[in-house]
Amino acid sequence: YSEESPVLSHLVVDTEKNTSATITEETSSGDFNTSFTEIYVDENASVEYGAVEKNGEFSYSRRKAITKKYGSINWLNGIFTGGLNRTKIETILKGDNSETEMTGVWYPTGEQHHDISLNVKHIGDGTKCDMDSRSVVDQKARSLYEGLQKVEQTAFNTSSFQDQETLMLSDNSESDASPKLMIENPDVEASHAAAAGTVEKEKQHYLESRGLSQDKAERLVVKGFFEPVMKQIKVTRVKEKIREEVQRKLDEKQ
């Protein structure tokens, strides 16, 4: 997309049975971006979807998938720009034994505001979900996260896990996280957690005692903080783009 024009997009992906697909999406727009992605995962089909957003001042993205039995959808979202960025990702696990992974990385700086929502609805039996996201917040930026795992009465033998962690690099930064569980069937294994903290003084002191400057020590801490999530990313192109954007953010701070 052109970096000077607004982006208004609607992408629909409809898979067939026993197929696999890898989708990568990178948006770069002017002041305004809005996009909607729909993915329909047929029986025993699998989809890897990765998006890296480098949009302008205002950005709204919504992504939704519906799975049939034994279908799988893995989402990856990297967000690094935009004055106000709102992203909602939703998976409806309709078919039995279908599953989803939702992996997120975002890094607001300056006065950016990143508002992220990850939702999953378990309808079929034996469905599985794993949400794992990490954010670094610096300067006067704000990170807002809401995660919802909903297990319907029809969903037996369900597994659903959610974890969100935030690293705050500035006293002026803000982070709000709200992980939620709505369970209507007792036959479930589920957990949810969220944590926010600053750079551990002991860790930074250890790195500096090994001859690293404060800036280089912080860079290592940030990269190490993202690494557990980076290891989960299966789409090489998206992983490389995210590493580039993290490096760019660190370089901008100098």
Image: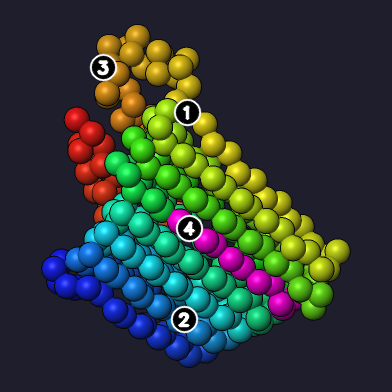
- Element type where label 1 sits in the image: strand
Q: Dividing the picture into quarters, in which one does residue 34 lie?
A: bottom left
The location of residue 110, given as percent across then percent down, is 29, 41
Q: Which residue is mark 3?
A: 213
Q: Nearer the viewer, mark 1 or mark 3?
A: 1
The magenta stretch spans which residues? 115-125
Q: Earlier in the sequence, mark 1 or mark 4?
A: 4
- Element type where label 3 sits in the image: loop
Labels 4 & 2 near each other (Cβ < 8 A): no
Kind of residue at badge 2: Ile
From this viewpoint, is residue 36 visible? yes
Is 123 colored magenta in this rendering? yes
Q: Determine whether, in the image, residue 104 is placed left or right of residue 5.
A: right
Q: Which residue is mark 4?
A: 116
Q: Decide: is 129 above or below 44.
A: above
Q: Quadrant of the C terminus?
A: top left
Cα–Cα span, label 1 and label 2: 37 Å
**Which residue is drawn at the image coordinates 40% and 32% (left, top)?**
172
Q: Which residue is mark 2?
A: 39
The foreground one among 21 and 170 is 170
Q: Which residue is mark 1?
A: 198
Is 112 colored magenta in this rendering? no
Q: Nearer the viewer, mark 3 or mark 4?
A: 4
Kind of residue at badge 3: Ser
Q: Determine whether, in the image, residue 174 is placed left or right of residue 32.
A: right
Q: Dividing the picture into quarters, in which one does residue 48 lie?
A: bottom left
Labels 1 & 2 near each other (Cβ < 8 A): no
> Label 1 neighbourhood size at 10 Å, few (<14), some (14-19), many (20+)?
few
Q: Earlier in the sequence, mark 2 or mark 3?
A: 2
